[in-house]
Amino acid sequence: MDFLRPETLAEALELKASRPDAVPIAGGTDVMVELNYDHRRPAALLDLTRIPELSEWSDGLRVGAGVPYVRIIEELGAQLPGLAMASRTVGSPQIRNRGTVGGNLGAASPAGDTHPVLLASDAVIEVASVRGTRMIPAVDFYLGVKRNAVEPDELIVAVHLAPAKGPQQFSKVGTRNAMVIAVCSFAISLFPAENRVGAAVGSAAPTPRRALEAEQFLASALDFASPKPLLDSVKREFGELVSRAASPIDDVRGSAAYRKHALAVMARRTLGWAWQELLDGEKACA
């Protein structure tokens, strides 16, 4: 196995063009597990840890693919609260210090913790090659189980997200409280100025996916102009529509029926938390 270590992004793209079989590695929290268990034996590893452009973020927000979870929590929590919440649920402190959103996207596991937030927040993924740069909306990025829209000669270089325009929430169910793969997960983003909602499920379908019917229902049911306490009937209907958006399987971590039930519960709760945050903000401004 060859080990390639470029110093610049341009050099990394040249190497990826000449060695499309090279597997990118940054935090290595997914790749090393696959190597240690002999689930994958690539011809080459492409180490991206020395490339400064990948470990930076800028206002806007353009978050480099190599920015670790711990920095998202500490440096971007106010601007990207949903992504920070999801990042806090990832693995252990050691994993959060090494793992990256870029790695989560590259693995494209349906259970990846950041995926529902990226979908609910209208994220756009920036990928690059020697042929140029492409911007892929998160809704078009996930193609199947552990399959994404990145071409063999491309690298994920950044994620673009607008600073939160309203409350965001993320919730995850696991078999224990830490260091666990999600049985199912859910993210919601409120966009009060646009009278719309983003909602997405994780670990409950072949890919992470938007709950489009649930989004449309809330957009018509919520009064963003003059917010009032939520009716229980609105929360229940929203939960049912989120559950309906999933197509889970039975596996060692949970049954399909449990996942659908849990998603409905998480949707109701996260909607309640997000809406209460909006109400509290209105009161503070009054």
Image: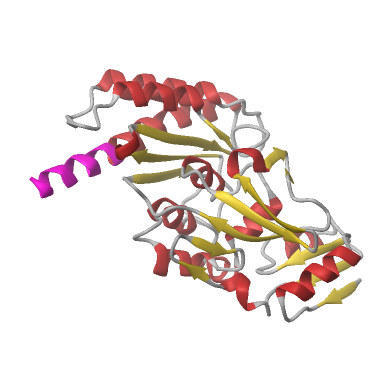
The picture places residue 129, in percent across and down from the top left corner, at 77, 61
Name the chief secondary structure element in magenta. Answer: helix
Q: In the rendered image, which quarter contains the C terminus?
A: top left
The magenta span reads 274-286
**Closer to us: 202 or 15:** 15
Residue 280 lies left or right of residue 110; in this view the side is left
**Closer to us: 79 or 225:** 225
Q: In the rendered image, which quarter contains the N terminus?
A: bottom right
Residue 227 lies left or right of residue 92; in this view the side is left
The picture places residue 272, in percent across and down from the top left corner, at 29, 35
Magenta-span inclusion, residue 283: yes
Q: Number of labelled discs? A: 0
Its colouring scheme is secondary structure
Q: Residue furthest left?
A: 286
Q: Quadrant of residue 238?
A: top left
Residue at (88% x, 68% y) in the render: 44
Q: Is residue 194 above or below residue 261?
A: below
Q: Is residue 153 above or below residue 28?
A: above
Residue at (48% x, 22% y) in the render: 213
Magenta-span inclusion, residue 195: no
Whether residue 206 is visible, yes or no, is yes
The picture places residue 284, in percent across and down from the top left corner, at 11, 49
Q: Is residue 2 above or below residue 136?
A: below
Residue at (54% x, 50% y) in the render: 114
Q: Quadrant of residue 157?
A: bottom right
Whether residue 45 is visible, yes or no, is no
Residue at (85% x, 59% y) in the render: 38
